Image: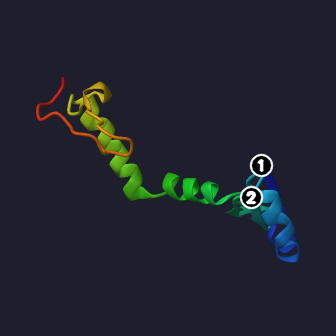
Amino acid sequence: MKEISLSEIKDRLSEYLRLAEEETIVITRHGKPAGVLVGFATEDDWFDYRLEHDERFLKRVTQARESLRAGQGIKLEEIDFEEPGDRGHFPTEKVA
Protein backbone atom coordinates (compact mmCIF):
# COMPACT_ATOMS: atom_id res chain seq x y z
CA MET A 1 0.00 0.00 0.00
CA LYS A 2 1.36 3.38 -0.99
CA GLU A 3 0.61 6.78 0.61
CA ILE A 4 0.50 9.85 -1.64
CA SER A 5 -0.53 13.43 -0.88
CA LEU A 6 -3.67 14.88 -2.41
CA SER A 7 -1.70 17.63 -4.18
CA GLU A 8 0.52 15.04 -5.86
CA ILE A 9 -2.50 12.95 -6.91
CA LYS A 10 -4.08 16.02 -8.51
CA ASP A 11 -0.98 16.65 -10.60
CA ARG A 12 -0.48 13.05 -11.76
CA LEU A 13 -3.87 11.33 -11.50
CA SER A 14 -3.53 9.29 -14.70
CA GLU A 15 -0.20 7.87 -13.56
CA TYR A 16 -1.56 6.95 -10.14
CA LEU A 17 -4.66 5.31 -11.60
CA ARG A 18 -2.35 2.96 -13.51
CA LEU A 19 -0.35 2.30 -10.34
CA ALA A 20 -3.58 1.66 -8.42
CA GLU A 21 -4.28 -1.29 -10.72
CA GLU A 22 -1.39 -3.03 -8.94
CA GLU A 23 -1.74 -1.74 -5.37
CA THR A 24 -4.08 0.32 -3.23
CA ILE A 25 -3.08 3.95 -2.81
CA VAL A 26 -3.95 5.89 0.34
CA ILE A 27 -4.46 9.58 -0.40
CA THR A 28 -3.37 11.88 2.41
CA ARG A 29 -4.36 15.44 3.26
CA HIS A 30 -1.98 17.28 5.58
CA GLY A 31 -0.25 13.96 6.29
CA LYS A 32 -3.44 12.17 7.40
CA PRO A 33 -5.39 9.53 5.45
CA ALA A 34 -8.25 11.16 3.51
CA GLY A 35 -9.24 8.55 0.94
CA VAL A 36 -8.25 5.52 -1.07
CA LEU A 37 -7.57 5.16 -4.78
CA VAL A 38 -8.41 1.69 -6.07
CA GLY A 39 -7.71 0.82 -9.70
CA PHE A 40 -9.14 -2.00 -11.76
CA ALA A 41 -7.03 -3.79 -14.37
CA THR A 42 -10.08 -5.54 -15.85
CA GLU A 43 -13.85 -5.30 -15.83
CA ASP A 44 -13.87 -8.50 -13.76
CA ASP A 45 -11.84 -6.70 -11.08
CA TRP A 46 -14.47 -3.93 -11.04
CA PHE A 47 -17.29 -6.50 -10.84
CA ASP A 48 -15.57 -8.32 -7.95
CA TYR A 49 -15.02 -5.05 -6.08
CA ARG A 50 -18.69 -4.12 -6.45
CA LEU A 51 -19.81 -7.52 -5.13
CA GLU A 52 -17.40 -7.41 -2.20
CA HIS A 53 -18.80 -4.02 -1.15
CA ASP A 54 -22.50 -4.55 -1.89
CA GLU A 55 -24.42 -4.79 1.40
CA ARG A 56 -27.39 -6.56 -0.24
CA PHE A 57 -25.14 -9.24 -1.76
CA LEU A 58 -23.22 -9.74 1.49
CA LYS A 59 -26.50 -10.05 3.40
CA ARG A 60 -27.72 -12.74 0.96
CA VAL A 61 -24.46 -14.69 1.35
CA THR A 62 -24.78 -14.53 5.14
CA GLN A 63 -28.41 -15.71 4.98
CA ALA A 64 -27.48 -18.59 2.67
CA ARG A 65 -24.70 -19.72 5.00
CA GLU A 66 -27.04 -19.59 7.99
CA SER A 67 -29.62 -21.66 6.09
CA LEU A 68 -27.01 -24.29 5.26
CA ARG A 69 -25.84 -24.45 8.88
CA ALA A 70 -29.47 -24.95 9.92
CA GLY A 71 -29.72 -27.95 7.60
CA GLN A 72 -31.85 -26.18 5.02
CA GLY A 73 -30.35 -27.08 1.72
CA ILE A 74 -29.71 -29.88 -0.71
CA LYS A 75 -26.60 -31.75 -1.66
CA LEU A 76 -25.18 -31.16 -5.11
CA GLU A 77 -25.42 -34.90 -5.77
CA GLU A 78 -29.20 -34.67 -5.32
CA ILE A 79 -29.66 -32.29 -8.25
CA ASP A 80 -30.75 -34.03 -11.44
CA PHE A 81 -29.08 -32.26 -14.36
CA GLU A 82 -30.68 -33.49 -17.56
CA GLU A 83 -28.90 -31.39 -20.20
CA PRO A 84 -25.93 -29.03 -20.30
CA GLY A 85 -27.12 -25.60 -19.23
CA ASP A 86 -30.21 -27.06 -17.54
CA ARG A 87 -30.70 -25.62 -14.06
CA GLY A 88 -31.65 -29.06 -12.83
CA HIS A 89 -34.57 -30.51 -10.94
CA PHE A 90 -34.43 -30.29 -7.20
CA PRO A 91 -35.78 -32.92 -4.82
CA THR A 92 -38.97 -31.94 -3.02
CA GLU A 93 -37.85 -33.01 0.45
CA LYS A 94 -35.11 -31.37 2.50
CA VAL A 95 -31.79 -33.13 3.01
CA ALA A 96 -30.40 -32.98 6.53
> Which residue does the numbered mark 2 point to in the structure image?
26
Left or right: 6, with 74 as reference point: right
Ranked by sequence position, the earlier of labels 2 and 1 is: 1
| Residue at 87% over, 70% down | 8
| Residue at 83% over, 64% down | 16
Query: Is 55 above or below relative to 67?
Result: below
Q: Secondary structure at mark 1?
A: loop
Q: Which mark is residue 13?
A: none
Q: Secondary structure at mark 2?
A: strand
Q: State which quadrant residue 56 falls in.
A: bottom left
Q: CA distance from mark 2 to mark 1?
A: 7 Å
Q: What amino acid type should be assigned to the residue bearing mark 1?
A: Met
| Residue at 31% over, 29% down | 76
| Closer to the camera in the image, 42 or 22 | 42
Q: State which quadrant residue 28 falls in.
A: bottom right
Residue 86 in the image, given as x and y percentages of width and height? 32, 45
Q: Residues within 10 Å of mark 2 (few under 14, many from 20)?
A: many
> Which residue does the numbered mark 1 point to in the structure image?
1
| Closer to the camera in the image, 38 or 92 | 92
Contact between labelled residues 1 and 2, with CB atoms less than 8 Å apart: yes
Return the residue found at the far front. 83
Residue 65 in the image, given as x and y percentages of width and height? 33, 37
